[in-house]
Image (spheres, rainbow, N blue to C red):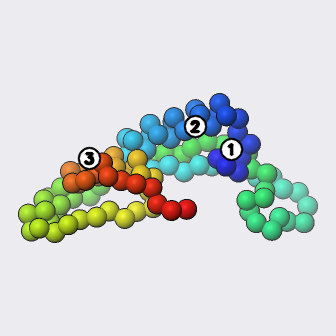
Amino acid sequence: MQLSKLSATEKKHLDKAMHTLASDGYRLLGVAEAIFEGSDFPATQQEFPFQFKGLVAFYDPPKHNIQKVLKAFYKAGITVKIVTGDNAATTSAIAQQVGFKGYEKAFPGMN
């Protein structure tokens, strides 16, 4: 989104859509296109003129036995943490779906 020339209104709509989808446990991928002619390539890919095309949302369901595994860990006194590259809202939603203790404490990682 930062590399595409989106208006403030477009960014607001996109943020809302991303929040809605991530809160339902979907993983999100932004898609953009850069058309470049010539041979004098930019030093970094971030310098290409990207045009935002849309979002791809996909759902990767948790393993069917994860609730049983978590219950066994908790019963044994094992503290469980989730470390992932997913969006914090996606992580929190999936953690809540599987009965993970502390799902509401998700926070974003560092970029």
Q: Which residue is mark 1?
A: 52
Q: Which amino acid does the dot numbered 2 rest on?
A: Leu
Q: Earlier in the sequence, mark 1 or mark 3?
A: 1
Residue 92 to residue 63: above or below: above
The residue carrying pointer 1 sits among few (fewer than 14), some (14 to 19) or many (20 or more) residues within 10 Å by Cα, namely some
Q: Residue at x 47, y 40 (%)?
A: 19
* Coordinates of residue 50 in the picture (x, y in percent): 74, 50
Q: Which residue is mark 2?
A: 14
* Coordinates of residue 2 in the picture (x, y in percent): 67, 49
Q: Secondary structure at mark 3?
A: helix
Q: Nearer the viewer, residue 91 or 57?
A: 91
**Residue 67 shown left or right of residue 109 in the figure:** left
Q: Quadrant of residue 78?
A: bottom left
Q: Which amino acid does the dot numbered 3 rest on?
A: Gln
* Coordinates of residue 72 in the picture (x, y in percent): 11, 64
Q: Which residue is mark 3?
A: 97
* Coordinates of residue 64 in the picture (x, y in percent): 22, 55
Residue 41 to residue 56: above or below: below
